[in-house]
C-alpha cells in the first residue's frame, strides 16, 4: 500500500512538473523575446509552418524518441517506448497551456516582455525540477541525450549544452532562411539558457530532500539531476 501511495505521489509530481514546464514555455512564447533552447525547434516549426505548437512538440519529441533505437541498438529497452505516449501527453499539455496564456494581455513594452521572459524561466525551472525528481520516464529530448551517454564516454551535462546550442543554431538558421528573421530565437532564449539550469539547482538544494521523502525515494537511490 505504501509503495502504491509513493508511486501515486511520483506520478502526480511527474505529470504536474510536465504541465508546469509547458506553462513556462507558453509564457516565454507570450513574451515574444524567444523561447527556451529545448523548445526552439518545435516553436520554429510553428512559426514557419503555422502548425500548432503542441503538435509540433509531439512530432519533435516522437522523432527524438525513435532516434534512440538506432543509437542504442541492442541496448535499447522496450520501456523506452513509453516516451512516445509521454510525448503525446506533453504535446497536449503544450496546446492547452498556449491557449490558456493567450488570455493574458499582450505585453506592450520591452519591460513587460522582459518580465514575462524572466517569469517563464522560473516556471520552467519548477516544472523541470518536479518532473526530473520523480525519476520516471524521461522526455525524449533528454532520453535521446541519455542514449548517447550510454554508447559514448560523454557526460550528460556536456551533451546537454551541446544539444541546446545545436537546437538554437538549427532554429536560428531555419528562421533566417525561411522568414529572414530570428523567429523563435531572441534574448529570452539566452536568458532561459543561463537561468533555468541554475534555478533548478537552487530548487534542488532547498526542496529535493523534502520532495524525495514525500515520494518515498531514498537518498541512496536518487539519481543526479540532469538539469
Image (cartoon, rainbow, N blue to C red):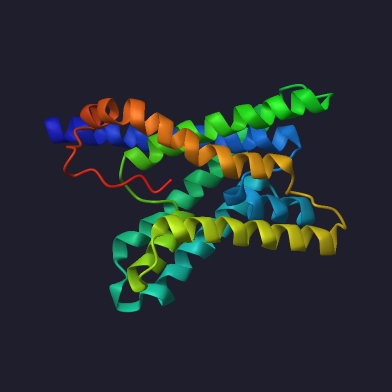
Residue 172 coordinates in the image, percent (x, y) = 74, 58
Residue 131 higher or lower than 39, as above or below: above
Q: Residue reaching furthest left?
A: 1
Quadrant of the snapshot with the C terminus: top left
Q: Nearer the viewer, residue 124 or 159?
A: 159
- Which residue is found at the position 47% from the left and 70% from the top? 67
Q: Nearer the viewer, residue 118 or 29?
A: 118
Q: Is residue 207 visible?
A: yes
Left or right: residue 165 compared with residue 8: right
Residue 44 coordinates in the image, percent (x, y) = 71, 54
Left or right: residue 210 compared with residue 153: left
Left or right: residue 187 compared with residue 181: left
Residue 53 coordinates in the image, percent (x, y) = 66, 46
- Which residue is found at the position 50% from the left and 45% from the top? 90
- Which residue is found at the position 46% from the left and 67% from the top? 66
Quadrant of the snapshot with the N terminus: top left
Instruction: Say which quarter of the image contains residue 168.
Output: bottom right
Residue 179 higher or lower than 5, as above or below: below
Amino acid at each position: 500500500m505504501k509503495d502504491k501511495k509513493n508511486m501515486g505521489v511520483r506520478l502526480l509530481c511527474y505529470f504536474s512538473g510536465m504541465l508546469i514546464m509547458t506553462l513556462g514555455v507558453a509564457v516565454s512564447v507570450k513574451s515574444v523575446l524567444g523561447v527556451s533552447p529545448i523548445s526552439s525547434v518545435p516553436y520554429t516549426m510553428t512559426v514557419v509552418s503555422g502548425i500548432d505548437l503542441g503538435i509540433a512538440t509531439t512530432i519533435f519529441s516522437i522523432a527524438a524518441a525513435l532516434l534512440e533505437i538506432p543509437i542504442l541498438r541492442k541496448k535499447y529497452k522496450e520501456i523506452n517506448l513509453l516516451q512516445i505516449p509521454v510525448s503525446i501527453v506533453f504535446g497536449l499539455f503544450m496546446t492547452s497551456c498556449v491557449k490558456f496564456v493567450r488570455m493574458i494581455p499582450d505585453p506592450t513594452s520591452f519591460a513587460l516582455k522582459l518580465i514575462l521572459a524572466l517569469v517563464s524561466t522560473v516556471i520552467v525551472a519548477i516544472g523541470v525540477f518536479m518532473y526530473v525528481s520523480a525519476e520516471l520516464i524521461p522526455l525524449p529530448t533528454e532520453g535521446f541525450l541519455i542514449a548517447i551517454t550510454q554508447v559514448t564516454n560523454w557526460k550528460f551535462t556536456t551533451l546537454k549544452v551541446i544539444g541546446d546550442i545545436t537546437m538554437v543554431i538549427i532554429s536560428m538558421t531555419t528562421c533566417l532562411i525561411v522568414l529572414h528573421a530570428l523567429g523563435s530565437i531572441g534574448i529570452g532564449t539566452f536568458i532561459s539558457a543561463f537561468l533555468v539550469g541554475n534555478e533548478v539547482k537552487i530548487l534542488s538544494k532547498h526542496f529535493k530532500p523534502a520532495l524525495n521523502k514525500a515520494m518515498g525515494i531514498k537518498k541512496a537511490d536518487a539519481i543526479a539531476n540532469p538539469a
